[in-house]
Image (cartoon, helix red, strand yellow):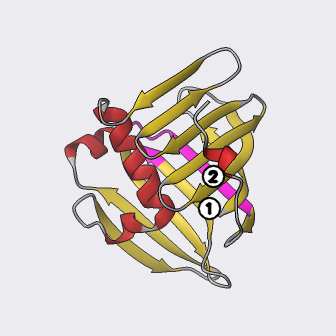
Amino acid sequence: MSCSFVQTKHISLLSDKMVSEGNMYYSQPGKLRWEYTSPYKYLFIFNGTKVYVGNNSKKDVIDTNTNKVFKEVARIMMNTVTGKALSNTSDFTVNVEDAQTSWLITLVPKKKELKQMFAKIEMFFNKNNNMISELNIVEKNKDKTNIKFSDISTNKTLNANLFAIP
């Protein structure tokens, strides 16, 4: 799967919102590339047990086997991308609503660690193609991140270099 996205971050302490754009790539099993291209370049790659985060000036490679926080964040991201979060009832309470043009799936965290990060995650799936079109992450402090996906492409071979840890 590959797509473009526009991410809008609403921070309660600021009147302005932060808007960024980028691309997301996913390949089975367990490879994810989340790439910000504007207004700054930043890259997140998850490949197996390794996570790369960075830009031209700062780069980190984290082994999720030795870092519990990154392991949990990577697991939640992958479960959300693959849809496993919908059936993993130990992590979230799942609520499905029928909206006019989409399905709204709301994930409310059950675990203490997740509750410290999120109040809820809302996923909108287009009824025409059953693909995710929008994602809202509402944090515990009520800050909100909205991500709108476009140009979604599935079942195409992606270059393995997209997921290489630099």
Q: Which residues are magenta?
A: 138-150
Amino acid found under the numbered disc labelled 1: Glu
Left or right: where 130 falls relative to 79? right
**Rendering coords of residue 55 (x, y %):** 67, 24
Residue 146 visible? The answer is yes
**Rendering coords of residue 137 (x, y %):** 49, 50
Q: Residues within 10 Å of mark 1 (few under 14, many from 20)?
A: many
Report the Cα–Cα distance between label 2 and label 1.
6 Å
Amino acid found under the numbered disc labelled 2: Ile
Instruction: Tell me: residue 72, above or below residue 13.
Output: below
**Rendering coords of residue 87 (x, y %):** 33, 72
- Tell me where residue 70 sits by quadrant: top left
- Tell me where residue 89 sits by quadrant: bottom left
2 and 1 marks in contact (CB < 8 Å): yes
Which residue has dot 2 on it?
Answer: 147
Which element is circle 2 on? strand
Quarter placement of the N terminus: bottom right
**Rendering coords of residue 163 (x, y %):** 61, 45
Residue 140 visible? The answer is no
Which element is circle 1 on? strand
Instruction: Tell me: residue 158, above or below residue 129.
Output: above
Quarter placement of the C terminus: top right
Any magenta on residue 100?
no
Residue situated in front as seen by the camera: 13 or 161 = 161
**Residue at x 34% of width, y 69% of height:** 94
**Residue at x 51% of width, y 72% of height:** 104
Which residue has dot 1 on it?
Answer: 134
Instruction: Tell me: residue 162, above or below residue 99.
Output: above
* Secondary structure mainly formed by the magenta segment: strand
